């Protein structure tokens, strides 16, 4: 049982933002920016890699709804919607969750990738081959 299952059953408190039969949204205890919210499915699955496609679709529609709300009502100028799958990608809780992180001019957050200088042609070829 993960900490998020305990949040769902109420044995651990959370700052709930939204709840329906399928999902719970609550404030991340560590606010990357004002309103940083986690959305979790009530039926637990480890990550986006194990979730059913309709759950992935619905959780992202909900993420969009919250994101638009934060832009309209919290004065956010943008949003990052991200999910981490597996420890290599930074996942620390093994219960699928989507981060909705409202962005503000003054938040000083950085989500930057680094150019690994890979050969684009060979990467493209390897991926196309992998689909065969
Ligand atoms: P990740 O690193 O993508 O697995 O995200 C897990 C998130 O869960 C982190 O941003 C934590 O701050 C957050 N978190 C952990 N425990 C709690 C909790 N009890 N209530 C709210 N958020 C939590």
Image (tube, grey):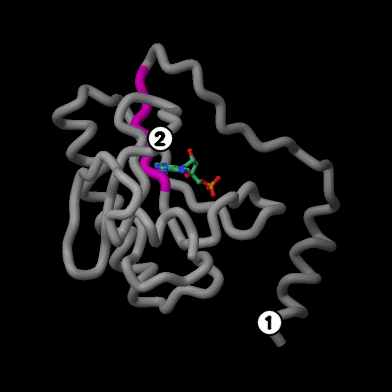
- Residue 117 versus residue 97 in the image, above or below: above
Q: State the CA–CA distance, disc 2 to disc 1.
A: 40 Å
Q: Which mark is residue 50?
A: none
- Residue 110 versus residue 47 in the image, above or below: above
Secondary structure under tag 1 reads loop
Q: Which mark is residue 29?
A: 2
Write down the residue under mark 1: 131
Secondary structure under tag 2 reads loop
Residue at 34%, 76% in the rendered image = 54
Q: Residue furthest bottom?
A: 132
Name the quadrant containing residue 70: top left
Magenta stretch, overall SS: strand
Residue at 27%, 55% in the rendered image = 10
Q: In the picture provided, is 23 more to the left or to the right than 49?
A: left
Query: As rendered, which of 117 and 89 lies closer to the eye?
Result: 89
Residue neighbourhood size for the residue with mark 2, other residues' Cα within 10 Å, grouped as few (<14), some (14–19), many (≥20): few
Instruction: Kindly indicate whether the residue at mark 1 contacts the one at mark 2 (C-beta within 8 angstroms).
Output: no
Q: Position of residue 115 (x, y in %)?
A: 75, 38
* First to last magenta residue range: 99-104
Q: In the picture provided, is 14 more to the left or to the right than 93?
A: left
Magenta includes 43?
A: no
Quick one: label 2 or label 1, which is nearer the N terminus?
Answer: 2
Query: As rendered, which of 12 and 123 lies closer to the eye?
Result: 12
Residue at 29%, 61% in the rendered image = 9
Name the quadrant containing residue 33: top left
Q: Residue furthest front?
A: 11
Q: Residue furthest top?
A: 106
Q: Position of residue 31 (x, y in %)?
A: 41, 29
């Amino acid at each position: 049982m993960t900490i998020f299952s305990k949040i769902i059953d109420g044995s651990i408190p959370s700052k709930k933002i939204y709840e329906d039969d399928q999902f719970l949204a609550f404030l991340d205890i560590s606010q990357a920016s004002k309103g940083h919210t986690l959305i979790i499915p009530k039926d637990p699955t480890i990550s986006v890699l194990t979730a059913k496609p309709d759950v992935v679709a619905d959780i992202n529609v909900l993420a969009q709804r919250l994101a638009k709300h934060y832009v309209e009502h919290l004065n956010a100028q943008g949003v990052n919607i991200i999910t981490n799958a597996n420890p290599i990608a930074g996942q620390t809780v093994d219960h699928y969750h989507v981060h909705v992180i409202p962005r503000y001019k003054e938040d000083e957050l950085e989500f930057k990738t680094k150019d690994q200088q890979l050969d684009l042609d060979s990467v493209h070829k390897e991926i196309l081959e992998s689909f065969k």
